[in-house]
Image (spheres, grey):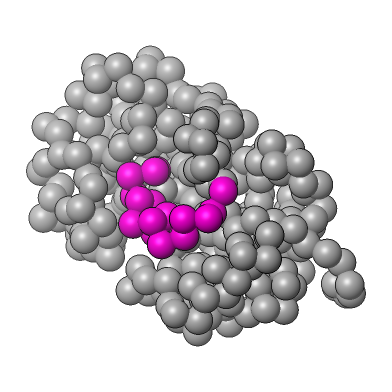
Amino acid sequence: MTVGKRAFRLLAVDMDGTVLNTEKIITPRTGRAMETALSCGKEVVFATGRCPAEMRNYLAAFPTMRYAMCLSGALLLDLRTGVILDETTLSPALAAQILSAAEGLDVMAVVYAGNEVYLERRRRGDLAHFWCDCYTALYDDCGNWVERSADVLSLGESIRKINFFCHSEADYRVLEQRMAPLPVNLAQGSYNNCEVSPLGVDKGAGLERLCRAAGIPVTESIAVGDSGNDLAMLRAAGLSVAMENATAEIKAAADVTVSDCDHDGVAEVIETYLL
């Protein structure tokens, strides 16, 4: 693809595996590039499966960032005003069906309600079993630990997404089959992570709605990602970018590929295409 002199105004960037390196850190070069873009009037947006509580420390580092796409597009925020630009939720009854579908499987449920994240207390020391111990510090910092995932449904908070970390591919495939009859959208956040969102919610639809709210044509947006839940966003953007550490599916869908998350691929995108 020839990008030429196209002027891009918005960068939607995934967090884990993209703007965050394998240590869950934004490196100095990438941070400086983001700050430069923001100071030049470009919109840099975290487009993530995380909830606001999980983004708190990263957002604090970029006080001039205007927008955020949370929970894979289920929640769009104006960070300057605190206004919810758009949100989509799971009904309590549907959320209960989703949790019931995982019964008997070796999986860990992560329930996103309101702006918070909830996990079962019995899983607190068991994250390595589900291949997600890289999130130990995150969940220790902002996780809410409950006796049963179903207890979250009685809190009266909007249920926006439910994630399942699976111990094995076999459990993942069974979970997919059980979810198939339900009116939900499934996305693969990582090789063992099944994201269950309200029907019609994905990062692509989220990017389109966010661009409308910001008054920016979606053709003037860049999307950067690494895994299956980024695919719809890459297809919607004016320029799609895959990280070198991305899945084969993402690389095949992208217009260009940049360095991996440990070697400032996002800085490369900003310096080459956004500025």
| As drawn, 109 above or below 55 | above
Residue at left offset 55%, top offset 68%: 35
Q: Is residue 211 left or right of residue 162?
A: right
Residue at left offset 21%, top offset 61%: 137
Residue at left offset 44%, top offset 80%: 28
Residue 104 appears anywhere in the view: yes
Measured from the top left, where is residue 82 in percent x and y? Answer: 47, 35
Residue at left offset 42%, top offset 35%: 161
Q: Is residue 38 magenta?
A: no
| As drawn, 158 above or below 74 | above
| As drawn, 252 above or below 119 | below
Residue interval drawn in magenta: 51-66
Q: Is residue 55 magenta?
A: yes
The quadrant of the rendering that contains the C terminus is bottom right
Measured from the top left, where is residue 151 in percent x and y? Answer: 20, 24
Q: Quadrant of residue 135?
A: bottom left
95 and 21: which one is in front? Answer: 21
145 and 217: which one is in front? Answer: 217
Residue 242 appears anywhere in the view: no
Q: Is residue 243 left or right of residue 96?
A: right
Q: Is residue 224 left or right of residue 182?
A: right
| As drawn, 214 above or below 15 | above
150 and 10: which one is in front? Answer: 10
Q: Quadrant of residue 231?
A: bottom right
Q: Quadrant of residue 96?
A: top left
